[in-house]
Image: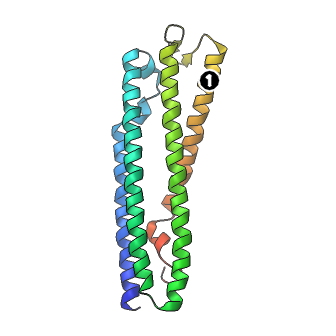
Amino acid sequence: MNRAEVYYLELAKRFAAVAGQFAQAFVQANTRLDMGAILTPARLANSEGTRLSLAALAEMKKLNQAHQASYQKFMLSYANEMTAAVDALPTGVAEQCRQTMTARLNHELNMQNRFQHAREHWIEAAEAICQLIESRRATCVFSEAGIHFAKKDDRQGFCDLLDIIKDSYRIEMAIAEARSKQSLIQFSLPHYLA
């Protein structure tokens, strides 16, 4: 292996480590927001709990936007450095690596875009649930079995919003699973170096 190939591998490993730290920081920040409590009947049973949920969702929205901006900067830096590293490889190898890197980079950007959109839909639907409950507080009933609405249209709207949340969650989990199977090192290495 020549020096350019060694540098390419080291760069891929460095970015893989940074990507792992990046993802871990995002998960930890979401954990601090206590996402699991946001839509629980216990939390939404009173106006103060709903206010807390809406505040957590506002923070989640800010976190999501900050994460996306940071991710874009990270991927731009990654793409620029990897392009320079590929350009330093021998000509035949460089073209093969460039094609592989471009395809994998586009795939990763597509997955991130899908993840961000799913998270945005999740947040919007959760906000709408909080607003629906708050606007129907006088007529909805909270029990161990869940939240019960007086009007059929309200119940249907609530169920529709829950479906959006479930679909968004499924998308996020599918992307997380795909990413856990494919590290950034695999994403970066051409098949002959992997």
> Would you name the residue on which mark 1 appears?
157
Q: Secondary structure at mark 1?
A: helix
Q: 88 and 133: which one is in front?
A: 88
Instruction: Indicate the position of residue 171 as horizontal and vertical percent values.
Output: 57, 47
Residue 192 visible here: no
Residue under the point 51% across and 60% down? 109
Which residue lies at the image location 51% right of the left edge and 81% below the top edge? 97
Q: Quadrant of the N terminus?
A: bottom left
Residue occupying the far top of the picture: 138
Could you tell me which residue is drawn at 41 percent across and 15 percent down?
Answer: 46
Q: Nearer the viewer, residue 136 or 49?
A: 136
**Amino acid bearing label 1:** Gly
- Classify 3 as above or below 15: below
User: Percent x, y for residue 134?
Assistant: 47, 16
In the figure, is residue 132 to the left or right of 61? right
Q: Is residue 153 visible?
A: yes
Residue 157, picture quadrant:
top right
Circle 1 Cα neighbour tier, 10 Å, few/some/many (<14 / 14–19 / ≥20): some
